[in-house]
Amino acid sequence: ALVPFLAMLPSPSSSLAFFLFDSTVTLTLFGYFDSRHFNIRRVFEHLFPLNGYSFLSSPLDFLLIAVIRILLYTASFQLRLAGKNSHVAWLNKPISIFCVACLAFSFLKCLIYSEQKELVECTGFWLLPVWNIICSAYFYWLWSTEFESCFATDDKKEVDDDSDEGSEEEEDQDDEIPLTKTQQVLILCRYAYGPWLAVVMTLSIAAAAVNVVMPHYTSSIMNGITALREAVDISQTVITLAVLTVVSMLLTGLRNGCFSYLTNIITSKMRKDLFHSIVHQEIAFFDTHKSGAIVSRLTTDVDTISWNISDFFDDSFKSILTLAGKMMVMCSLSWRLTLLNFISFPIITYITVLYGDFCDKLGDDQSEATANSHQVAEELISTMRTIRSFAAEKSSSQKFAASMDNALKVAKKEALAKAGLHFSYDFYYNCIYVIVLIYGARLVTAGTLEAATLVTFMMYQMQIGEHILELNREIPAFMGTLGKSRKFCKFLVRKPQISTDGAGEQPVKGELRLDGVSFTYPDRQSNQVLDDFTLHIRAGESIALVGPSGGGKSTIVALLERFYEPDEGQITLDGIPIAEYRHEYYHRKIALVSQEPVLYDCSVRENIGFGCNVSEEEIIAAAKTANAHNFVMGLEDGYETTCGEKGTQMSGGQKQRIAIARALVRNPSVLILDEATSALDNQSEQIVQEALQNCAANRTVIVIAHRLSTIEKADRIAVIEGGRIAQV
């Protein structure tokens, strides 16, 4: 009850109060150590042993541990005052080892003291180890909380030291939101819920309950055979065990089926949420994050994360329940032998946590390596025509093989670490098994334990090793998942830097004004594209923007489309800042036809109506205005003809006319044509030009082009050079 009170005290007052309280309670318990009632004389006898110190009977060790806790905290405090935060951060591992050793030591002392039967009945025998465990756990929490800033400073130094790893990583870090492991766990836990999880948990509880009692019947059969009992008695036990085995198999089968479906639910939900977050990011996000890497997050990373999350919750829950039940049974059989297992738990758990931290870092590396290989594959496959035209198949294969080799190097590190870990686990648990067996035989010889009870206990001992091993596999796997999920979580919680929360839906005439606009691309900060750019475009006017490449023409289009926000200045539509319009409404009123329009692998009808809810008549009307209706009707399936991936089934002129129809079906007030005919032959250009003439009526039209035929009918021509208006 006092611990929460101490936690509320200001630091270092709470720390000082805790250490004083720790020492006082430890000394007080000396008076109860070998007596049922407090005896002040025994305190001094244990504090100053005149007959010499004995590890087997003296409680002085616990006071020494309390003093070490005070010294460690004081040393850390002095180091922080001296500004040596890196030294404090280095102490984290030794102090965690010390606290783990305190836990194991407490169980060991209990076991040693239990050899003296008169001590078992004394209050101090139980309270001293328990108090040491509580204080060690609280000490580590207090130390970690107090000196957390030192860890952060040390981590920042490591990041600064590694800042030369590449500009691409720096760009990613600028976008990423710092997340703690706790925040990551909370994000991932959001997906482990729902009725199917409850079903899996219920089946796990039932299966665990059956598994807890099965070793008892197994040992009964073995003891019955050894004692040559009546066959009837053994047969009844065998039948019971057989029924329990069948029930266990049925429960396990049902649980695995539900678990598989639960994993698919989690995967689907994670993909939907991640895709929803990604498509709402600003365009600058996609300038600094490669598409192949993003697809890797959506596919490979989500598959790995969802499987590991569901596997962790399912297997860990089942193992913890079964382990807890079997440990209670084992404790009822022999609490002394059970203490031997408790001695080993803190040590093996600490080894698991260390390996888990390694898996966390390795998981991040694996995720990056996999994303890089996906990016290389996506880039090469999407440019197969270029590869074939330059006979670059061999070099492309070598490039992809190199990316896979990098991923394999990371996997090799994981395999070596896993091999060492499992060897350590097997060696450690085999040693514990032998020690328990030897100590159990000693208890049987001393008459403290029956041989039949030892057989039953050893049956449970063999099985708890499997459950602990399973838990120790799941913890590093989950830590590895945290590493792999870091980018997933950051993408998921990332807020777009350009807000789309506008609500305006005022009628639009089409008057545009750019006032004092300056802009630099986020990934090219040293190159300013627009510098105090001002341009007024009247409603219903047709204006052509011309000038040398790199002057800023396409950047103006990107700003009008709200792909980016200007660094300075303002853009208005009918006198209202474009950010105040509702996102969907604004992009219905301003439509873009680019130089290389993108068509999707769906029908012509779906491509024209992409992103908006329009009728069949509106689609056909837009196609006619764009001079696309006739050629579409000449296709085998008409408007149901599939355009192919990125429109590969259509010619350049056909793609442009479908793109124009897609823009017109929205009935925009402003139409932007970004070199819409520059890549076409003369015949196709003439057809598209006619379509553009048809759709320009009663609209504000912005034309970006180099050809005279494209701009000759514009009301005004603005020459843009060096990010400014050179002439109008």
Image (spheres, rainbow, N blue to C red):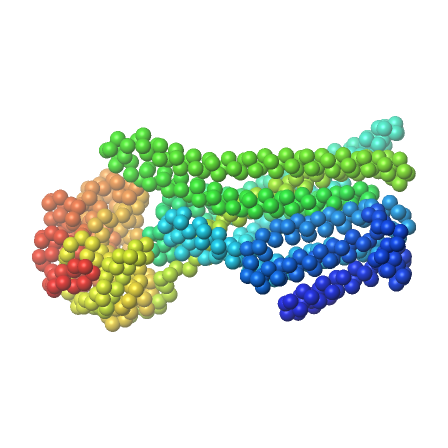
- Give the percent coordinates (x, y) of residue 571: 26, 67
Quarter in which the N terminus is drawn: bottom right
Query: In the displayed structure, does residue 724 sit left or right of residue 503?
Result: left
Query: In the displayed structure, does residue 444 sit left or right of residue 534?
Result: right
Which residue lies at the image location 77% right of the left edge and 57% below the top edge? 63
- Give the percent coordinates (x, y) of residue 91: 61, 53
Which residue lies at the image location 61% right of the left edge and 41% below the top edge? 473
Foreground residue among 25 and 544: 25
Picture layout, residue 414 above or below residue 505: above
Please indicate, yes or no, whether residue 640 appears anywhere in the rendered image: no
Picture layout, residue 351 above or below residue 537: above
Foreground residue among 431 and 1: 431
Foreground residue among 321 and 92: 92
- Give the percent coordinates (x, y) of residue 322: 70, 44
Query: In the displayed structure, does residue 717 sit left or right of residue 647?
Result: left
Query: In the displayed structure, does residue 336 sit left or right of residue 391?
Result: right
Which residue lies at the image location 33% right of the left edge and 41% below the top edge? 379
